[in-house]
Image (spheres, rainbow, N blue to C red):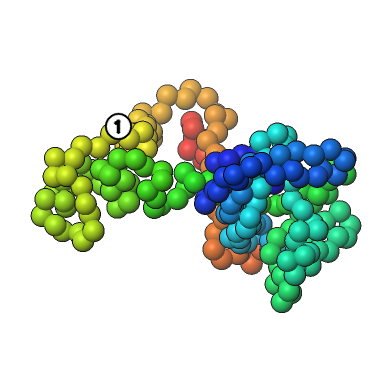
Amino acid sequence: MTQRKELFVNYEEFDKPQKVGMGDGHTVEACGRGDIHFTMTLENGKPRSVTMCNALYVPKLTCNLFSVRATVMKGNKMKFENGSCWIYDRNGILLGTGLLVDKLYYLQCTSVTQECSTVATGSEVNNKADLWHQRPGHLNESQLREMASQDLVRGVNIPKSARTSFCEKCVEGKMAKKPFKLVGEIQSMSKLRVHSDVCGPMPTESIGGSRYFVTFIDDYSRC
């Protein structure tokens, strides 16, 4: 159950809100349901993409809730030991992990919102020109009109004079920062003004089992 409607990838509104019983005895209303995409963190640190099906949208929740009972009834297995928990499917494959924090178990996962989707659907965009602007990866307006006027792609049904709306994502994607100064233009007059950066996770672990490395560069000495 979640109170965040933007997490659903195929949300379906209920004709009438459904009552859901909570652990403390009171009930809340679920307004709809759908699937939610997650990235689970496994024991080895590797991510795993999973989908939680038929999750409930409950606006009055203060946090997301994951039902152990519903998980077990679907044939999965839960293991709790030493402040950690593991979720296995019926074949024994690890699906996800959790940690005990302040008397509650928290799943080690991150949600994938609809904004991360690479393909737009008809329900998300009302204007056909905007829809076809998004589907090929935010194609510019002139090439979009050329694609329609010359019938370069089958199934594209938009007017030849179609114009796209203002696209905030395109503006964000074209934003650029000023370049860093060259080494000869450094203005630092003393040491210990340090620039740091992190690289990783690397696809292959080091001999010591590391998947990240950190750089530290002194702005004055370039050490």
| Residue furthest bottom in the image | 91
- Residue 10's x, y, as percent? 52, 51
Q: Is residue 135 positioned above or below 180 on the image?
A: below
Q: How many marks?
A: 1
> Residue at left 70%, top 34%?
60
Helix, strand or loop status at disc 1: loop
Residue annotated with mark 1: 166
| Residue furthest front in the image | 15
> Residue at left 82%, top 43%?
22
- In the rendered view, does 19 fall on the left or right side of 6? right
> Residue at left 66%, top 48%?
56
Q: Amino acid at mark 1?
A: Phe
- Residue 58's x, y, as percent? 68, 40
Residue 146 vs residue 162, the one in the foreground: 162
Q: Is residue 220 positioned above or below 90 on the image?
A: above
Q: Is residue 134 visible?
A: yes
| Residue furthest left in the image | 150
> Residue at left 11%, top 50%?
149
Residue 176 vs residue 165, the one in the foreground: 165
Q: Is residue 176 visible?
A: no
- Residue 75's x, y, as percent? 75, 70
Residue 55 vs residue 183, the one in the foreground: 55
- In the rendered view, does 91 fall on the left or right side of 160? right
Q: Is residue 155 positioned above or below 163 on the image?
A: below
- Residue 223's x, y, as percent? 51, 40
Q: Is residue 187 positioned above or below 127 on the image?
A: above
Crowd class of label 1 (few under 14; some 14 to 19; many from 20; radius 10 Å): few
